[in-house]
Amino acid sequence: MRRFARVLTFALLWVMGFAAVAWAEKVDMSPEELRETATHIVVGKAEQIFARTEKAGNYEYTRYVAEVRIAKVEKGDGLKPGELMYVRYWRKRWLGPGNPLPDTSGHRGEPGAGQTLRIYAAKNAYDGFGTTKDGGYNVIGANGFEALKSDTQK
């Protein structure tokens, strides 16, 4: 009887652990991890947001580009206050039957036009999801946007 109870307990714990993983998202990076991973950190105002949505398999992907007017450069070369910076980020949504496989749904805390942000970005480097070497700026995933109050711009 004890053996049955142990097996049952183990089975229940295993199932509960699997269920928790099935809904897993990419864990947010700490401020230190964001700073270390980013090749560029800027504070600026999102002037415009451009979006393109496409379906692939059982998912709908929305890929965004934010046009950001730079107020301050905290890390990285080649950017100056007053210039525009274009940063890329994405989201995906499950359209298929049942529950999706364990995976991330993309970036969180996406900006709106007019919002002041600290942006942690990667250029030709690992961006939290993978490595891109095309010269563009990818927002660190999944939490590379930090909303700021426009009057303080930290």
Image (tube, rainbow, N blue to C red):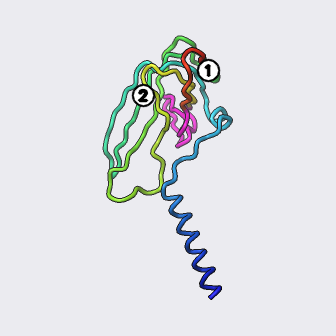
User: Which residue is at the front of the view, 102 or 132?
Assistant: 102
130 within the magenta span: yes
Residue pictured at 51% horizontal, 32% vertical? 138
Kindly identify the amino acid type of the residue bearing the numbered disc 2: Val
Q: CA distance from mark 1 to mark 2?
A: 21 Å
Q: Position of residue 53 (x, y in %)?
A: 33, 37
Neighbours of disc 2 within 10 Å: few (<14), some (14-19), many (20+): some
User: Which residue is at the front of the view, 18 or 122?
Assistant: 18
Q: Position of residue 100 (x, y in %)?
A: 40, 56
Q: Is residue 22 above or below residue 92?
A: below
Q: Position of residue 95 (x, y in %)?
A: 32, 50
Residue pictured at 46% horizontal, 34% vertical? 89
- Magenta-colored span: 122-144
Q: What residue would you read off at disc 2?
A: 65
Residue pictured at 54% horizontal, 47% vertical? 26
Q: What secondary structure is found at the residue carrying circle 2?
A: strand
Q: Is residue 123 left or right of residue 49?
A: right
Q: What residue would you read off at disc 1?
A: 77
